[in-house]
Amino acid sequence: MMTKAAVKKLHVKSLKHFRGKGLLVNYRPDFPENHAAYPAGHIILKPHSAGGHVLPYPDQSFNDEEDPGSAIDAPRVVVCFKKGKWWCSVDEFLTDPGPGDFTASYKSEPEVVAAVCEYFWGPSSKMLDLINNNIEMHASRRRRKTRQPDIVDPCHTSLQPGL
């Protein structure tokens, strides 16, 4: 009888690291183990009180009106393990990646934890490169599917470092 391999989840040490930096993350995964996109994935939110980058597409649904420092001022990050890699995703737009969306893979859990922290507090130029590369990759895929010429969409080149 074949048994199903256990799904990897973020270690408690990583979750405590995020919480120690002021990020909001549950100890239990936010997505089920059989979720197609984010198996046993965790949503990580950055409240204003944690400092760091403020990004233009915040999810305001987690605001606590009595505590302005709890306002979420950056897109949510989802971390999960699938296909033998750790994944970090910002996916705020439906159907296609929009400005600021990206997905990146990492070989180890410490690497993905560092990437999340860098996203919220690191040099904005590094994440901007990742975001722009991801936008161009998806635009190129769309063009191949629809047989459109390889032209960079000028709407996606307006991202500026330091947002």
Image (cartoon, rainbow, N blue to C red):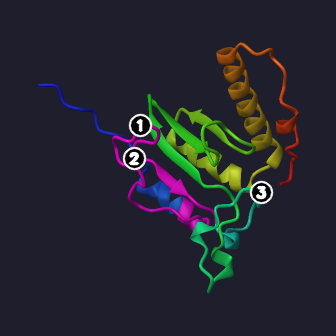
Quadrant assignment, res 7 = top left
User: In the image, is 129 to the left or to the right of 42?
Assistant: right
Kind of residue sitting beneath label 1: Ala
Horizontal and vertical percent position of residue 136: 76, 28
Task: Say which mark, if any, is on residue 56.
Answer: 3
Mark 1 nearby-residue class (10 Å; few <14, some 14–19, many ≥20): few
Task: State the residue position of label 1.
Answer: 36
Say left or right for 163 vs 46. right
The residue positioned 70% from the left and 55% from the top of the image is: 120
Residue 150 x %, y %: 81, 17
Pointer 3 local density, CA inside 10 Å: few below 14, some 14–19, many at least 20: few
* Image: 67 above or below 143: below
Residue bearing mark 2? 40
Which residue appears at 86% of the width and 48% of the height? 161
Residue 9 on the magenta span: no
Q: Quadrant of the C terminus?
A: bottom right
Amino acid carrying label 2: it is Ala
Percent across and percent down for residue 39 are 40, 42
Per the image, label 3 sits on a secondary structure element best described as: loop
* C-alpha distance separating marks 2 and 1: 10 Å
Q: Are marks 2 and 1 in contact (CB under 8 Å)?
A: no
- Tell me the magenta residue range: 18-46
- Looking at numbered disc 3 in the image, what kind of residue is underneath it? Pro
